[in-house]
Image: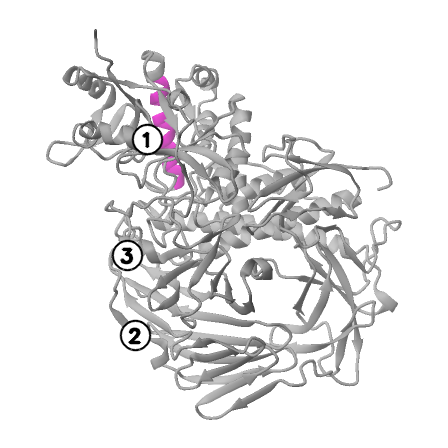
Amino acid sequence: MTARKQNLYVAHSTHLDLYWIGTQPECLEIGAQIIDDAVRLAVQHAGFTFLLDTVRFLEYYLAKHPDNTSVVKKLFDEGRFEIAACYTDRLENSHDGESLVRNVQYGKKVLNRLIGLNTELAYHPDLPGLAEQSPQIYKKSGVRYYLFARGFARGGRFWWKGLDDSRIVAYNFPVHYSYYNIEKEIIPYLTQTKRSIQAEDVLISCSAGDLGAANTFFSKDADGKWDRVPLMETIEALNVRYPELNVQMSNVKSVLDRMDTRNLEVRSGEYPSKWGTFGGSANNVRIAQMDAQASALLLEAEKYSTICDLLGIAVERGAAPVNPLKHRGGSGGSRNYFELRQHPTCLEEWFDFAWRLQLVTQDHNYGGIGGMQSNFDRFLYKSCAIRIAEDIRNQCLNRLVSHIRPQSGQASVVVFNSLNWERTEHVCIGGDCLDERKTYVAADSSGNRSPVIRTPEGYTFAASAVPSLGYKTFSIEEADKIPEAVPDKRTMMNKDRIIIVNPFYEVVIDRNSGSLIYVKDVQLNRTVIENPDFLSVDLFADRSFSVSEKVHDKQPLESSKHHVRSVEITEDHAYWTKVETVTEIGHSKLVMQIYVDHCKKEIRVIPTLFWIGEKEVQLNMNLGFVSEFARVHYAVPYGVQQMGRFLDEERPWAGDEISPELYERYREAIGWMVLESADAGICVSSSQTSFDFDRGGLRAMLLRVVRSGGDQDVIFRNEGKLSWEFRITSYCGDWQRERAYRTGWERQYPLCPILNNGAGEPVAPKLVLPPSCSWLDTGGEGVVTVLKKSEADSEACILRAFNSTSGAAEFAVATSLPVQDMESCDLNETVCGDELNRLDPYEIKTIRMNIRRDGV
């Protein structure tokens, strides 16, 4: 009886990096040639198969070779070609949750438009880290399999469970997607691999490497040197040399479909980036901050434009005279961007265009050949997306304000809240809208009055009880004097100390070091900060490459506390006391502003650095709280993760990854984190995402200026004016009960005041909006991130919310908008059977709201 041969199936691809082998236009051109060669090879050889990482490269190829569309479609229909769902091969740990959703949605939409294809694959071979909510996002997008290639030396296959109970099958290719020797690193370990993947057949990745030619495998020779070999010939040789093996190219999904999943292991937990801070906010400060800003503005613009549409308020954005990415100037040159072929002509197309720009800039690899040009391109794309979103949002808000009658003919301010809970915050109206010689108060319709105070930014007042996803009008009235909002506030200063006491905190700032050395929570009678170096900014030597930071105990170079020029109180009024420290670090001026809020329990810190771009250094800020606050939860895309619960116990081992010690310490926190003791906690919300949980205490990694691993001559110096924001608050109990996560969302989505002087007349006089209104309320449960028009049905809109906590909640959506009924749907907008009025633990819920047009 002939023994059964061991099946060794080969997934062939080329890793389609968008910014690594060259600039984006160059990489797209190389990718198009590779796909063209793969099409030719597939036509010539019946056994040739090919897997594409992302939809963007296929879109570019078919735009360049439209006559090949039918051939390409046939190859996909036959299963000879396969493609993954995402539009770009984005990082997962560093971006907001809705960006991850839009990437797979946009990829599927473009793929359907191009060749009418749906795919059940996700393929991210080179990602250094995984997002804990990816299983839920992909499952609700119709994706069943997630392929990746880092982390499991002998491969892995398991049910990957998200923070909720969503599960998809994850398959990790043994060793890597390329750059290894099959005979030395695969064949001798087949028994271990089969045990690891819990299957008899083995699937390996024989990729051509980063934008390598089709039908090649970037291997290693017998001496360990890089060796690009012809793949089909290599497979033939392996079958001759190892007659006990059946080595063949294969359709990936068909192999995975045949693997039994009934007793497959279930895994969940955090999988931090093995590239450390690369892609986060430390390596490229401006790009990271622009990324968060673009998503937030786009989501707000979608919400307000949808509300305007439902209210019958016209908001228009037609065709632009020129594409906003087009080269401007007298050089006579031109830019070679694929997006220059896009010509949006209506509001929906502008949203589509802006999200496209955002997704393109989130590709996982940048800083390779032509890295500085790529940095400029990404900056330009994000700037364009931000301008589009700001223009649409501001037009919507101004149109809404034009339908609100000012009270008693007085100037008023309409304050908008884009989040789904009632909020009280300081707002500021800029410019010379008021007479600075007079005293004013802001009054609401119930007679509540708060002082209007002149600050360096403009006129500030406390906007109280602004309704959930709605607005509130405050009239600006003259007053005899400013009422003292916090009568028991005390501020003291001598040559060594500044002491500030209010109903929330006792704060001590050292005037010699500029450090915030002591903070006591007065309400809890607990010390939360007792650290002589808190807020000191320290410079360390960092001679590593961007992705492969190996040294975990770096040489300190200097500290800002040794260069203090001044520590002064620059503002002290009813709303806050502001202390400003001027110091120096790395031959660069550093201004540290500390705001002690007197109206709510919060300390706000804004470091501003005028950085000259010193290279091969790392800049960290000390955030070492009292040691009892040691249990850490941090925000991840559309979720929250507990630090230390790993998906996989295997630590970084590849040359282009960080050290195991740093892997234990480094985390990307998307917006906020909490540090808790047994009965209390501290919440830190921040525009910075990169943090080091060192044994000596928490440190914010403000920036790194290091060489790129893709091109050692490329260094992102981060020079210029850089600014960050940190908000600190403490609480009794646990973060879920206290809804501590709200602070991060409120920082990212501040209340928006619009001056209403009554100069404009409503476009539709019959529609007069009340002075205060909530368009949508969920009883404070969950976070509503999306309210947008449906792409599948013009008579519906889509609401998306997620649960940040491990507890289920009633989710009753109340709305004053003309909605006929609601039904749960998946991320493809297909109606599903999920319970409408319940928000399960960590659930991402999408609701289709059918519009009632009568009476609008």
- Mark 1: secondary structure: helix
The answer to whether residue 328 shows anywhere in this view is no
In-image side of 521 versus 418 (left or right): left
Residue 778, image x, y percentages: 70, 50
Q: Which mark is residue 558?
A: 2
Mark-to-mark CA distance, 3 and 1: 27 Å
Q: Is residue 5 magenta?
A: no
Q: Residue at x 54, y 25 (%)?
A: 112
Q: Tell which of 88 and 800 is nearer to you.
A: 800
Q: Nearer the N terminus, badge 3 or badge 2?
A: 2
Q: Residue at x 57, y 40 (%)?
A: 353
Residue 229, quarter of the rendered image:
top left
Q: Tell which of 459 and 848 is nearer to you.
A: 848
Label 2: few (<14), some (14–19) or many (≥20) C-alpha neighbours in 10 Å: some
Q: Is residue 28 magenta?
A: yes
Q: Tell which of 72 and 788 is nearer to you.
A: 788
Return the residue found at the far top.
1
Q: Nearer the N terminus, badge 3 or badge 1?
A: 1
Magenta stretch? 24-40
**Quadrant showing the C terminus:** top right
